Image: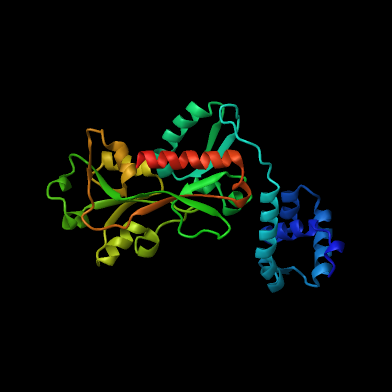
Amino acid sequence: MNINKIDLNLLVYLDVLLREQNVTRAANQLSITQPAMSNGLKRLRELLNDPVLVRTSEGMVPTERAKELQPTVRGILLTLEETLQPDKEFEPELSHRVFRIMASDYAASTLIPPLLKKLREEAPHTSIDIMTPSDVTFHDVENGKVDMAINRFDELPQSFHQKTVWRDSFSCLVNKNNPIINGFNLDSYLKAQHIWVSKTGFGVGVGMDPQDVQKLGWVDEALSNIGKKRAISVFTRNYHVAMHLAKEQDLVVTLPTRAAELYRNNENMEILDPPFPIPALELKMIWSPLLHRDTSHNWLRQTITEIAHQLA
């Protein structure tokens, strides 16, 4: 096969088709007509001597040959796009850039306020578009539609760049009138009613099963490791809701310490150390290789890193 005779646009077509697994969506992604995309798929099949995508009862699925090619093609295109990024110095005081950041409400509450203050001081014309984990997919980050995602992640695509923002311990937040304060220990903790709160990764959440310890997260896994289990009355994906409920009810919420510290000066609340060991939470920021050399993005990453060090 002579590469000089290959239309390299077909690599772009192949990349999008394998990600979308749908001709119409792939055409929309590239802003071309569906017939043009169908023609591109036809040419790919001829070039590779392979069907590429096969129609099944579950829709279009890639062939084994296409699956083998996908990471290589994605890597080639990412390298090319990254190399061609313009190397222009970023001037924060003149920039009107909108930074789109996916952040859990834990990250948004603890990291974004000092970041916004820094931006208003050094880049007063920029703005932040804060998105929730349910607003964003890995594809959005990979394609550079979202500048950055800041959260705790269980699994990440290998192509992403990542950096640890900070590690955080856990604390228990309770109402000061909650009788559990008197003699707070593992036994009283287990007898109490609890608020479960968590939101990691991307996508829309599903209903929780109190019996499925592995999906309940770090607090319940830590309890399971010592052969214990807590009674959960409320499940929420929002840290502020959890903290507000703890303030209003005789409930215990166990959450990252930096979030609990938001209530440090609240006269109605008490922060307690958990009566059992819980592994530290690791907050990360991740971004696309397409933005790795972008000077404005690099400035944002450095700014977040500096703020995290200052808060630590």
Position of 180 relative to 13 (above/below): above
Q: Residue at x 85, y 62 (%)?
A: 4
Q: Seen in the image, is 84 located left or right of residue 145?
A: right
* Quadrant housing residue 44: bottom right
Specify the quadrant that holds the N terminus. bottom right
Q: Seen in the image, is 245 located left or right of residue 14?
A: left
Specify the quadrant that holds the C terminus. top left
Furthest-left residue in view? Answer: 183
Kindly tell me whether residue 131 is visible in this rendering. Answer: no
Kindly tell me whether residue 79 is visible in this rendering. Answer: yes
Q: Residue at x 25, y 52 (%)?
A: 193
Q: Position of residue 258 (x, y in %)?
A: 33, 43
Q: Seen in the image, is 85 located left or right of residue 271?
A: right
Q: Position of residue 218 (x, y in %)?
A: 35, 58
Furthest-right residue in view? Answer: 5
Front one among 5 and 206: 5
Q: Position of residue 190 (x, y in %)?
A: 21, 57
Front one among 289 and 22: 289
Q: Position of residue 154 (x, y in %)?
A: 45, 59
Front one among 12 and 77: 77
Q: Residue at x 70, y 67 (%)?
A: 69
Front one among 2 and 109: 2
Q: Residue at x 23, y 52 (%)?
A: 274
